[in-house]
Amino acid sequence: MGQVVHDLTEEQWAALRSLWGGCAYCGADVAALQKDTMLPISRGGRYTLANVVPACGSCNASKCNTEVTSWMRRKKLDEGRFLVRQAEIARAAAAGPTPTSPPGPG
């Protein structure tokens, strides 16, 4: 793992947790979300903005080192909806915080 480049920053991880609002797979709103790699490290995945989603311990343990779409099919979850949302959230997190308006007069 030390030979692989992982470039997910703490700011990006915080943005992912905030934008998902819970577990990316089941929606559970738990405080202790874990970084889950959609393509597992053991299969060539990395900790990157495009490959990491927040997961509750139950979903993360269930998925183990399975690729996300295979796991979602087995669990009968809506993989298409998940993948569209994941792409939208990764894009939003990459864009960073939206600029705020300058303070008005007075």
Image (cartoon, rainbow, N blue to C red):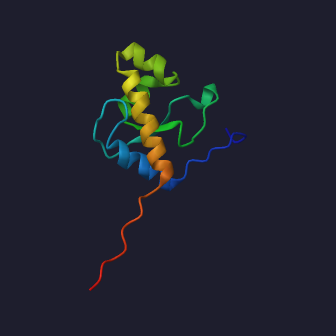
Q: Quadrant of residue 32?
A: top left
Q: Is residue 53 above or below residue 93?
A: above
**Relative to residue 74, is residue 28 drawn left or right?**
left
Q: Residue at x 39, y 46 (%)?
A: 17
Q: Residue at x 32, y 41 (%)?
A: 22
Which percent across, then down, holds residue 35?
47, 40
Which percent across, then down, holds residue 51?
53, 36
**Relative to residue 29, is residue 12 drawn left or right?**
right
Q: Quadrant of the N terminus?
A: top right
Q: Residue at x 26, y 86 (%)?
A: 106
Residue located farthest toward the front when viewing the structure as drawn: 105
Which percent across, then down, holds residue 8?
56, 48
Depth check, front residue: 16 or 91:
91
Q: Residue at x 47, y 42 (%)?
A: 90
Depth check, front residue: 43 or 101:
101
Q: Is residue 19 above or below residue 80?
A: below
Q: Is residue 42 above or below residue 56?
A: above
The number of discs equals: 0
Residue located farthest toward the right when viewing the structure as drawn: 3
Which percent across, then down, holds residue 87?
46, 36
